[in-house]
Image (tube, grey):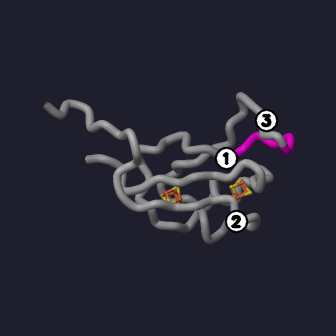
């Protein structure tokens, strides 16, 4: 089963508040502790993209409107074992 959707996080707006991480029912998101955004925060990212159901909760709760949710199969996604 491919993921049902994916999110884009605008790192110019993300302030690493972790609200999206806490509220995502699928535990898709995490802070990327390996790097800093141009604003100096560890930005949220899709740690488990395969689990996203495109519910839109993360986008709704983000206080900085940093997240855009897309429905469908993520671009570039290739189902393992196909063919
Ligand atoms: S759309 Fe839903 S499942 Fe996907 S990352 Fe956001 S809160 Fe999680
Ligand atoms: S809720 Fe928004 S500002 Fe907070 S960590 Fe998630 S993307 Fe960043």
Residue located beneath label 2 in the image: 65
Tell which quarter ligand 2 is in: bottom right
Task: Say which mark, if any, is on residue 36.
Answer: 3
Q: Residue furthest left?
A: 83
- The residue wearing badge 1 is 44
Place residue 20 in its image quadrant: bottom right
Tell me where residue 9 appears, x and y as whole percent.
63, 52
Tell me which label, 1 or 2, sits earlier in the chain.
1
Residue 64: % across, % down: 75, 64
In the image, is residue 50 above or below residue 61? above
The span picked out in magenta is 39-43
Identify which residue is drawn at 72% across, 33% down: 33
Residue at image position (52%, 61%) is 69
- Distance from mark 2 CB to nearest ligand 2 atom below 8 Å: yes
Mark 1 sits near ligand 2, with its Cβ under 8 Å away: yes
Q: Secondary structure at mark 2?
A: loop
Q: Are marks 1 and 2 in contact (CB under 8 Å)?
A: no
Q: Position of residue 51 (x, y in %)?
A: 42, 49
Determine whether, in the image, residue 80 is placed left or right of residue 23: left
Mark 3 residue element:
loop
From this view, report whether residue 81 is shown above or below residue 76: above
Q: Residue at x 55, y 44 (%)?
A: 46
Q: Is residue 81 left or right of residue 42?
A: left
The local crowd at label 1, few if under 14, some if 14 to 19, many if 20 or more residues have their Cα within 10 Å, is many
Q: Foreground mark, 1 or 2?
A: 2
Q: Main secondary structure of the magenta part?
A: loop
Give the alpha-carbon distance from disc 1 to disc 2, as whole Å: 13 Å
**Lateral position of residue 76 relative to residue 28, left or right:** left
Residue 10: within the magenta?
no
Quadrant for the C terminus in the image: top left
Which image quarter: residue 72? bottom left
């Amino acid at each position: 089963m491919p993921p049902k959707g994916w999110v884009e996080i605008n790192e110019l707006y993300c302030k690493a508040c972790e609200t999206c991480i806490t509220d995502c029912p699928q535990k898709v998101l995490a802070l990327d502790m390996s790097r800093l955004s141009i604003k100096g925060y560890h930005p949220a990212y899709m740690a488990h993209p395969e689990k996203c159901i495109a519910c839109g909760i993360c986008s709704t709760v983000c206080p900085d409107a940093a997240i855009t949710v897309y429905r469908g199969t993520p671009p570039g996604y290739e189902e393992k074992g196909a063919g």
